[in-house]
Image (cartoon, rainbow, N blue to C red):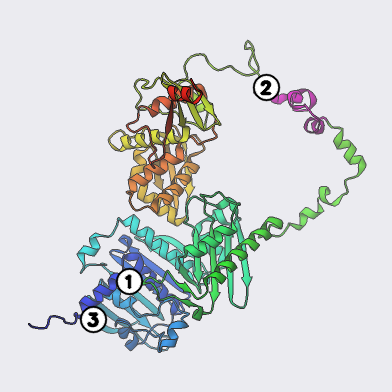
Amino acid sequence: MPDIIQLLPDNIANQIAAGEVIQRPASAVKELLENAVDAGATEIKLIVNDAGKALIQVIDNGKGMSETDARMSFERHATSKIKNIDDLFHIKTMGFRGEALASIAAVSQVELKSKKAEDITGTYIEIDNSVVKKQEPVAMPQGTSIAMKNLFFNVPARRNFLKSNPSELRHIVDEFIRVAMAFPSVFFSLTSNAQEVFHLENGSMKQRIVQLLGNSYNAKLVSVQEQSDYMNIYGFVGKPETAKKTRGDQYFFVNNRFIKSAYLNHAVMGAFDEMIAKDSFPMYTLFIDLDPSQIDINVHPTKQEIKFEDEKIVYAFVKSAVKHALAQFSITPTLDFELDSSIQHLDAVSKPFTAERKSSVASSSLYNTFTQKNQAHFIENKSELKHWKDLYEPSSGESGALNPMPASPLTNAEVANREPGFVPLRAFVTTAPTALEHLTQLHHTYIMGQNEDGFMVIHQQNAHERILYERFMKAVAGKPIAIQQNLFPITIELAAMDMVILTELLPELHLLGYHLEPFGKNTFVIQGTPADVDQGNEKTAIEKMLEQFKHFSADLKYTKREKLFRSMAWQRAVKGGTALTQKEMKILVEDLFACNTPNITPNGKPVYTSFKKNELDKMFGR
């Protein structure tokens, strides 16, 4: 029998290795940005076209490479950072295994330009499928520019598995944020299809966090700073009110390298215990510095998972550091600005509050209105505020202080105007399919109704979620929801990641009654919304929908459209704790039993439960 084992050709071996390192365009972005950081660059520009499928280019002003180094950098396991086995356990750079450029060259067409400060000319190298096609001198400034084109052009099966452009761009933005967050002293920019998405000037850590995650965090960050002989921890955590339903804004860095660690995340969650809801997640950007010999970063191809020599010490240190920071905040909140000195010279501050002035204030009718008991009903008689009575008094010829409810059945619009927290939906109800009578609301959360067999208890939020979900399904199936045009268009500014998500969802949102148009950098104009969205609540509705969409995005079994429907249904459903009128409860029950699947929510939660009369009789011995 002839021998059957043979060595793989280099180009095939490189493609197999590339499958571990370069899984999608974002993987290449991560490797190229890390190389630029390791080169000591102070300016790094990332340019992508077609979400990295057509072009990924990184331009830096780092130290550059010589002609020989430029050629060697594309060889497998070629690195300048490891010379012996001990170096592997003292790594302080981002890249070190020499796989990145070799893997990139195996699955794309690469053009490299690089020049050292002391060289007269730089080096230009063109590589196609791991084969050097051209090498020549080139005039250029100090630094490196590497462009990879047509990713997976020679592995069409891998290219077919890539997601849509907005989806791949989201992953690129993720990787960009993780590198840019760790190095606030470096200028970063990201340009996608000739449109600048990020322009990050160098600055402080807090400035970089706000640049990346949005201005909403500007006044809501708590500084974390603890040092010990074993390790240091620094960074910021969000105040409890910034907690969200998703883990999106959570970043851990060990020696400036982004990592994922459920163990350390649990430590931070423990520090926030009883300060935020159980299903909420705090924002944090925390940096841990410790001796590289205490960690192993070479346990995963993407280097996002590491092992600590002593996890328990790190866990306890992180938890106590965050707790200490939050405790300091709760006692003495810190502000980023000093008190204006002119305030100190105002009369109210500089002059003493004498007994004479106190007596003068206490004798005023306005003071008495808010300090004496039982004054609420006599405010117009006791103070100078009598003219406010005109706002709620009936006009001549009407009786009663407030207009009574009309006796005739209310329209949907009238109900919506009276109860802004609840929106009745009658889009596909024809006749009342249930015989529930005597509807009663329990704890502002449950609706109880009687029928011939016994009674039924319905969870109002779960029921409304099912109604909305099926309404959205019908909208996509050919019955788009009517759009109510805004009299004055509303602008909404989003973080870059949310902007990418919203761009991806625009077609589906239009079917669901939202008319949004891009309006410059990270900004959209809300031209119209569904008729049942309260005026003035448009921005909040979209922001909450995006937050819920990101919450569902962790579940890979749902399609993008399914995630959107579930997010919208949850966001717009009437929440527990909202008081409903008889009319609203009746409409909700009718709409529920007109659904195809009225008994469960889109997420599989029960909507109602029934109690039989004969079972009740048995309970009481009848």
**Vertical order, 111 against 595 (above or below):** below
Kindly identify the amino acid type of the residue bearing the numbered disc 3.
Val
- The foreground one among 351 and 13 is 13
Residue 21: assigned label: 1
Q: Residue furthest front?
A: 621
User: Residue at 21% across / 76% down in the picture?
Assistant: 12
Residue type, mark 2 in image: Asp
**What is the C-alpha distance between the residues marked 1 and 2?**
72 Å
Report the front residue among 197 and 330. Answer: 330
Provide the secondary structure element on which disc 1 rests.
helix
Residue at which label 3 appears = 132
Q: Amino acid at mark 1?
A: Val
Residue at left offset 59%, top offset 77%: 230
How crowded is the residue under tag 2: few (<14 C-alpha within 10 Å), some, or many (20+)? Answer: few
Position of 608 relative to 319 (above/below): above
384 part of magenta stretch: yes
Q: Position of residue 375 (x, y in %)?
A: 77, 27
Q: Which residues are magenta?
A: 365-391
Q: Position of residue 379 (x, y in %)?
A: 75, 26
Q: Is residue 354 above or below residue 113?
A: above
* Numbered badge on residue 390: 2
Mark 2 vs mark 3, foreground winner is 3
In reply to whether residue 305 is colored magenta, the answer given is no
- Whether tag 1 and tag 2 are in contact, CB under 8 A, the answer is no
Q: CA distance from mark 1 to mark 3?
A: 21 Å
Q: Reading the chain from its start, which is encountered first: label 1 or label 3?
A: 1
CA gap, disc 2 and disc 3? 85 Å
